[in-house]
Structure formats: C-alpha cells, structure tokens
C-alpha cells in the first residue's frame, strides 16, 4: 500500500533524506531503526506532510495515489496516521470535539454518514478500553496535563478511533516505563489486521518484543542501509549499530 | 419583555427606579447614590501615567431619558437562578448587597442607540456578587463604566464578554475592607473595524486582599483592541496578592492590540505580578489537528475557542456559560 521511491527531502537547505526506498504491504509491520540524527523522524514527518520539509526528489504512492501532492488532512483521510513522538497539548479543546471533528471529516471524504452523538460516545468508551484510558477522557482537553506515558497511550487511543490503514509510530516507546510500554504495544497489536500496516520507528529493541516486525530496516544518514527480518533487531541490541554503519561513515 | 418590577420579591430584594427607591428609602439612597462617582472624581489614583491625563472619568452626562435603576439585595439574600437584565439604552444603576447576600447577575447589552451606562456597586462585608456582561457586535457605541466598593471578606467577580463593535469598558474596584477578593475577567473577539477598549482599575487600600485579572483577546482584520490595567496598592496595604494577565492572539497583519499594565505598589510585603502575551495560534497544534484530518480553517476555530474556555469557565451558571460559549463560537466563525 505504500511505495516510497528514491525519496529526498531537506530542511533549511540541508538534505536529510538521501534516497529512501521502501515498500509496505497490507498486513505488514515494518520497524525502522537507526542512530539518532539518521532522519527517522524526518521520514515520518515527510510522510505526514509537515510544511517544514521540502521534498526535492522521489515519489511516494499510497493506495496507488500520489501522497506528496495531498495536503496533510487529505493524507489522514486516505488512512495515514502519525503517532507523534511529542504529542501536542491543546488546552481548551476537548478530546471529544477534537475526534468528532476528525472522524467527521474522514467520513465525509469517504462518503459515509456522520456518526450520531450516541454512536460517537459509545465508540469512545469502547476504544478507550484498548489503552486503559478512563472514559472520562471525553471532556478533558487534548493531552493537557497528561504524563508522557498518558500522551503516548492517547496516541494509540486516537489510532483506535481513526482506524487508519497505515500507522507511522514515531518513537512511540520513548520516555515510557515498562507498564506504559506494555499498554501501548498491546494496543497496537490489538489494532493490527490483515488490511492495515504499521511502520514503527524506534531506537530501542524492546518495543519490538511486543510489536513483532516482519521487516527491520536500518536508517543511517538519510538512507536505508540494511533490511532484514526481526532477528536484526535483536542483533542490533546486542552489538549496537557500529558494525553496520562503519562502512557508511566516510560518506 | 423584561419587566423589572416583577423582580422585586417577597424576600426583600428591590428593583426600583431611583425615584421610587429614593422615596421609600431616602436614608439608604442618600448613603450610596453617586458616592463612588464623587470619590472617583476626587481620586487622583487612577491617573494615566502614560498619557499624563486623568484617564478614568465616567461620563456622568447621561440623557434625562436614561433608565435609573436600583437593585437592592437585603441581608443573606440568595439567587436560585441568575437574574438577567437587558440594557438597550443609557442607564444609571446602583447595586447594593447587604451582609452575606450572594447574588448572580447577568447584563446583556442590546443597544438600540448610543449607550452610556454607569453602575455603582456596594458590597457589604461577607457578601458576594458575580456578574457576567454580554456585549454584542453592534454598530452602536457603548460606554460601560462600573465602580465597585468592596467591604471586608466580600467577593466580586465580573466577566465581560465582548464580541466587537465600538466599546469602552471601564471597571474600577476598590477594596475598602480586609480579606476581600476581586476577580476581573474579559474575553474580546474583534474583527473588521471593531474598536474595543478595556480599562481596569484595581485599588487595594486595606491589607489582606486578593485580586485576579485575566483578559484575553482574539483579533483580526483591522480591529483595535486595548487593555489598560491599573493596579494600585496603598502603602499600608500589606499582605496583598494582585495578579494581572493579558493574552492576545493576533490573526492578521493589520490588527492593533495594546496591553498597558500599570502597577503602583507602595506596600512592601505583597505579591504582585503582571504579564502580557501576544502571539498567533500554536503551529504545532494546528499541524497535529490537520494530521488527524481536521481542516485548517476548522483547526483554527477550535484552537481559538479553546483559547477562551478557561475564562468562560468562570461563569458559574452552566446554562449561561454554554450560551456565552455558543455566542463566542459564532462570532469566531464570522471572523
């Protein structure tokens, strides 16, 4: 469902992504790992469409359509979800209004009828169980006063509500204690179907104990330098990145 | 229609014209009426040091046809629901709360002409008054001047919600008893060629009082919005806490928004602070909302609404609070 071909992107004149190639099919889980500064978050942001980055070369096809041409919100309607590394606090805007608006637009795009208030509330109650968030969440402001772990769980809650076909989780495990990690990971696994796919961007292997990837890619200096199966994650955990990246350091 | 006469109730609350009230209770009337206006005229404390001119002077020249109304609340009187009043033309008002009265009032401005309103408020010890003011987006200019004198351990809260137009709102609060609490809140949504000015004067003359001011503005178009917040703490007014905050969101390049805090603190054992911010909507929040599929224009509206909810939350009556928030949302949608 996702085809990334020779993707180059820059910010403030500096090239960060230097030709990424990646194919993700329905039902797959891909892990993207790599040392800090490799471009992992940049890749996620470019897929989402963040204004800050300029694509200079390459193409991305999502569901057979040109993703890079679409505005941010349209990519979401097409089924792209980004789990933010640093979820944003939005004081004064309730989770209910926030998600109601989001889901409303998505359904409109797909030609579906709007959800009634009752249906919506029912959905919120149901999905909040997946990440063990209290259902009194509805009236709370988005992420306001949430701990790091609660914010990450709230990302997965939103993922459950929006039902995307491609989720890109950007360092979803950063700043999480073992319990929060378990809840987040269980939530993600719970939402996995044969029709959707997930890209997990992570620095550490431990999340991948719970969210077992089909493919592991190592991103270094803006390129995917190595791809393999899930054993690669364990090997990186044991040996670090040095053995892989040393050949690329001269570039 | 609003028949204020019906508001005079069995429990002693009076809603009468100046003439009627003066006739029935001349001693009480004499004790209060125009006292605060006279004091303000003598009081050099609210002079505007920026412009070097006396700045807080009420326009006392109301037309003869102006309403002159007294609201008198006897000892321990309490509302069951908010008392609402419509103000459609110039008006003088005198409000008195006896000890332990707890009153919740709402003033809805629906001007049919240029409107000048002067209101004097006296709060006896232990009394509590909450007021919400709704000012519409109207072509008629409105000058709204409110003087409040607070007795010991009294509480006063005023929330002014302005949807634009041409308006000057002046609220002066003087604490003359210790342990009093004053809350002044304001929300302004302005666009087009709206001109709105909020001028507050908070005077702490006695020790052990608190005051909290928080005004927020969302402005676009060619609107001009000014906030001028004066705080005065007298030399003997120790153990005062006085806070002022003014936050502004500017949505266009041609908007003019000014914040002028003016603090004169003469006591040395006090906690006082003031702050003003000017900015645009949070870019990260807008991006986050768009990534969830919310249209940019809608994200902007949600954020703007979210910006004001902490202040609409100060309105204690739920129905009124929702009504005010609705009006604000509609105004934001029209910006």
Image (cartoon, rainbow, N blue to C red):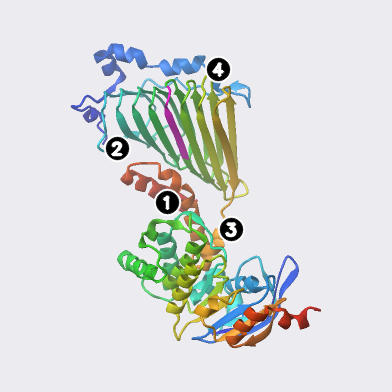
Q: Which residues are magenta?
A: B178-186
CA distance for labels 2 and 4: 36 Å
- Determine the residue positioned at 39% across, 56% down: A139
Q: Does A45 sit left or right of B324 as displayed?
A: right
Of marks 2 and 1, the one in the foreground: 2
Look at the image and tell me whether residue A170 can be seen: yes
Q: How many marks?
A: 4
**Residue farthest along the left direction in this orientation:** B10
Q: Residue furthest front?
A: A238
Front residue of B40 and B285: B285
Q: Residue at x 53, y 39 (%)?
A: B245
Q: Between disc 3 and disc 2, whose residue precedes?
A: 2
Residue behind mark 1: B330
Which is in the foreground here, disc 1 or disc 3?
Answer: 3
Q: Which residue is mark 2?
A: B82
Residue neighbourhood size for the residue with mark 2, other residues' Cα within 10 Å, grouped as few (<14), some (14–19), many (≥20): some
Q: x, y (%) of residue A43?
A: 63, 74
Out of A139 and B116, give the one closest to the viewer. Answer: A139
Is the magenta region chiefly helix, strand or loop? strand
In magenta stretch: residue B180 = yes
Sequence-wise, which precedes: disc 2 or disc 1? 2
Q: Quadrant of the N terminus of chain B?
A: top left
Q: Chain of mark 1?
A: B
Q: Which residue is mark 3?
A: B283
Q: Provide the secondary structure element on which disc 4 rests.
A: helix
Of residues B253 and B319, which is closer to you in this image?
A: B319
Characterize the local packing of mark 3: few (<14), some (14-19) or many (20 or more) Cα atoms within 10 angstroms. few
Give the Cα separation between the discs numbered 2 and 1: 23 Å
The circle on residue B44 is 4
């Amino acid at each position: 469902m996702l085809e990334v071909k020779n993707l180059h992107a820059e910010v403030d004149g500096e090239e960060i992504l230097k030709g990424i190639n990646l194919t993700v099919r329905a039902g797959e889980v891909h892990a993207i790992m790599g040392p800090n500064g490799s471009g992992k978050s940049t890749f996620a942001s470019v897929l989402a469409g963040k204004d800050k980055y300029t694509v200079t070369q390459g193409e991305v096809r999502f569901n057979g359509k040109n993703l890079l041409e679409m505005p941010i919100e349209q990519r979401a309607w097409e089924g792209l979800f980004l789990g933010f590394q640093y979820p944003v606090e939005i004081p004064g805007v309730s989770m209910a209004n926030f998600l109601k608006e989001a889901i409303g637009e998505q359904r409109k795009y797909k030609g579906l009828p709007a959800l009634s208030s009752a249906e919506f509330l029912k959905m919120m109650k149901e999905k909040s169980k997946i990440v063990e968030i209290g259902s009194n969440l509805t009236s709370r402001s988005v992420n306001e006063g949430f701990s790091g772990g609660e914010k990450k769980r709230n990302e997965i809650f939103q993922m459950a509500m929006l039902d995307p076909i491609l989720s890109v989780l950007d360092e979803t495990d950063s700043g999480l204690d073992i319990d929060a990690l378990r809840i987040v990971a269980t939530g993600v696994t719970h939402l996995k179907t044969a029709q959707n796919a997930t890209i997990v961007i992570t620095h550490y292997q431990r999340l991948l104990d719970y969210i077992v990837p089909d493919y592991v890619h190592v991103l270094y200096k803006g390129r995917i330098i190595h791809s393999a199966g899930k054993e690669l994650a364990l090997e990186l955990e044991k040996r670090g990145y040095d053995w892989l990246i040393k050949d690329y350091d001269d570039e | 229609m609003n028949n204020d006469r019906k508001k005079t109730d069995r429990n002693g609350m009076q809603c009468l014209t100046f003439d009627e009230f003066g006739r029935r209770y001349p001693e009480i009337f004499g004790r209060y009426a125009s006292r605060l206006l006279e004091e303000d005229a003598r009081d050099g404390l609210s002079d505007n040091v920026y412009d070097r001119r006396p700045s807080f002077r009420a326009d006392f020249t109301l037309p003869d046809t102006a309403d002159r109304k007294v609201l008198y609340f006897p000892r321990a009187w309490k509302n069951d629901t908010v008392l609402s009043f419509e103000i459609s033309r110039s008006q003088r008002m005198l409000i008195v709360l006896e000890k332990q009265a707890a009153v919740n009032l709402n003033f809805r401005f629906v001007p049919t002409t240029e409107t000048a309103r002067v209101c004097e408020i006296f709060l006896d010890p232990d009394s509590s008054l909450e007021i919400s003011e709704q000012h519409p987006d109207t072509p008629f200019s409105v000058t709204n001047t409110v003087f409040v004198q607070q007795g010991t351990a009294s509480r006063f809260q005023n929330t002014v919600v302005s949807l634009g137009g041409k308006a000057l709102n002046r609220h002066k609060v003087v604490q003359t008893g210790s342990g009093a609490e004053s809350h002044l809140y304001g929300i302004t949504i302005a666009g087009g060629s709206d001109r709105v000015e909020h001028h507050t004067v908070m005077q702490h003359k006695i020790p052990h009082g608190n005051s909290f001011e928080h005004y927020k503005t969302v402005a676009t178009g060619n609107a001009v919005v000014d906030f001028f917040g004066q705080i005065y703490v007298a030399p003997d007014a120790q153990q005062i806490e006085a806070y002022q905050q003014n936050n502004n969101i500017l949505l266009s390049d041609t908007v003019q928004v000014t914040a002028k805090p003016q603090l004169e603190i003469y006591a040395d054992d006090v906690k006082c602070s003031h702050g003003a911010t000017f900015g645009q909507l949070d870019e990260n929040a807008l991006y986050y909302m768009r990534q969830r599929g919310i249209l940019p224009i809608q994200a902007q509206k949600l954020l703007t609404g979210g910006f004001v909810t902490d202040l609409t939350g100060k309105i204690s009556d739920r129905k009124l609070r929702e009504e005010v928030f609705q009006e604000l949302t509609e105004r934001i949608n029209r910006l």
